[in-house]
Each structure stands twice: as structure tokens, then as C-alpha cells.
Image (cartoon, helix red, strand yellow):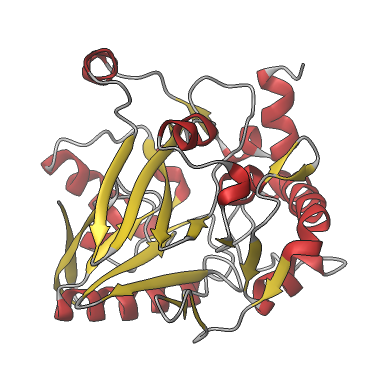
Amino acid sequence: MNTRRQFLTRTGLAAAGLVYSPLCADQRDRKLETRNPWIYHFKIGEIDAWSISDGFMHFGQGLSLMYPVSEREKMVQALKLHREPIDKIPLYVNVLVIKRDKEVAIFDAGFGGVPNNRKGWLSEAMKKIGIKPEQITISFLSHCHVDHIEGFVADGKPAFPNAALHITPEEFAFWRAKEPDFSLTKRNPKSIPSMVKMAKRNLEILNPQKVLTKVGSELLGGAVTVEDGFGHTPGHAIYRIKSGAEELLHIVDLAHHHLLMFQNPNWAIGLDNIPKRAVQTRKRVFAQAASERTRCYGFHLPYPGLGVVTGNEKSYQWKPE
């Protein structure tokens, strides 16, 4: 059995300052009052959808992980104004599952069954909603960071054996390169070797299921469109899901915080691989989402991750449902 320290070291989370936060009192009470507070069912037109929490944690580095450095005092003031913590950055892990007729799709898969009672909740939640791993017919890997890819592998094998795994060619090529280029990132360099090793190992296991899927591709009978979310990683994908007159835009990792990256889309997290591109992408997507009042879903936004973006190019707000 791996210890918690061994797991954090292996995945690079310790070096990245990513640690796990105990549930606050109201969350503990809520868990006692409901059978499973981490499963949220909703509809996208005729499509059944579930937001499943795979865990909750925080970046212990706090604002030292946010850039530019010259803007950090403004970030502090923004957080204080909204009574948000300034010593750590909360991070939610939300996994989207949808069902259309006999097709079942999953968008990223969280951490998987790792030894920590603050994450790895996806598999239990799937059992509760009555979906077996072999019933997943299609899967989408937005990018290869640990909290998105690890759940696709279980006991050294694909966790969803009957599901094609869609990943952009740009993302796949980046991680399969002999030496992936991290020259522009502000990420802690100590975390990079273990992260690359983890991604390469998982991609090798998942290679038989891999389908290189370009931006603009439509899947599930046109219900899902792969869109350009590049910047956080070189091939980071976002997804637009449509059914009838309704749609949902899954922005994945365009925002790691429900206040900071909306109030000023120039404010960025140091985990971005291509920071300038990530900011450009965020501005473009937020502008469109706000203009069209598009219903959105965020992998790292407060659970269940659903809401709309409001505001203008100078400053946006995340309005949860």
C-alpha cells in the first residue's frame, strides 16, 4: 500500500503544493443528511447528465501560485472583499458524465482509486447512479494532468475498457515527446519529471483506446463538439454539448478559481504551460459565453460546477446555478 507521502511524491503533487483539505463542518453535516451529496443530476435538452465530485483540495501555496506577481495585492483585495481565503486556493474536482440513448460519455476521470479519503470518489458515485465501467462507450481526455487522466487507469489497465479515448493530436504529441517543452511555464520545476512520467505511463496503457480528435470534431451524433482550449496545456480541449435548443460549454481548466480568473482574465495560475495562450483563450471563451449567456460547466469551479459567465472584457463574474 502506498503511503500518502509516496503518492504525493510520485505524482508531483507535493512539489506543486497541492494538498488535501478536510471537509468543513457544513459539508460534513450535509454528507450525513443526504445519501450522496457529491452526485448532481441535471439535463441538457434530452441528454441526462451528472456532475460527480471526485474530491476537494487546496493549493497550499496560495497566491504565490498566481500571476502576474505585480497584481497579487489586487488579488488579495478582491479576495478580502468577497470574504474568500487568501492563504490557499480551493480546488474542486468535478467530473461530467452524460447519457444519450445507449451512449454513455465521461469527460476526464479525476484521480482514480488513490489512497486518500478526500478524493477518488468517482467510482463509488458511478455505482450509485447505476453505470458500470464497461458501460462507458466514449471518453474525453481534455489534457494529461494527474487529476484528469489517472482515473482512466485502474490496476494498470484501462478503467473503461469499452470506451474510445478522445484526445487532441496536439495534447498527445506534447506528452509523447522525448522531452516535453515546459520552458514557458511558471510551474515548480521539481514537479515536472514525475508529472511527465505519470502522463507517459498512463498514455501507454491507454494507447489502444486512443483516438486523435481534432478541434471542430463532432461526436455522439453531433451532440459533442471538441473546441480549442489551448494554453493551459498545448492541446487542452474544451467541449460544447448540445441537445435540441439547449447547450452546455464545458470549460474544463480555463478557470481554477471562481473569483480571480473571472474578475481579471489576465490573472493566471502558474500551472499553465503556455501562459499567454491560456489568457488569450480564456478571454475569447469568456467573451463568447457572456455574450450568449451560455450555460457553462467547470472542472475546478465550486461543485456542482454549473453556472453562467457575466460581465465584459474588463471583468467577468461566475454566477453559479
The residue furthest bottom is 216
Q: Quadrant of residue 253?
A: bottom left
Comparing 109 with 4, the one in front is 109
Residue at 30% from the left image edge and 21% from the top image edge: 35
Residue 203, horizontal then vertical, whole percent: 77, 57
Residue at 63% from the left image edge and 51% from the top image edge: 149
Q: Quadrant of residue 62?
A: top left
- All told, the count of numbered labels is 0
Residue 289, horizontal then vertical, whole percent: 23, 75
Q: Is residue 122 visible?
A: yes
Comparing 96 with 56, the one in front is 96
Position of residue 205 relative to residue 138, above or below, is above
Residue 194, horizontal then vertical, whole percent: 77, 44
Residue at 67% from the left image edge and 30% from the top image edge: 8
Comparing 26 with 223, the one in front is 223
Residue at 39% from the left image edge and 41% from the top image edge: 52
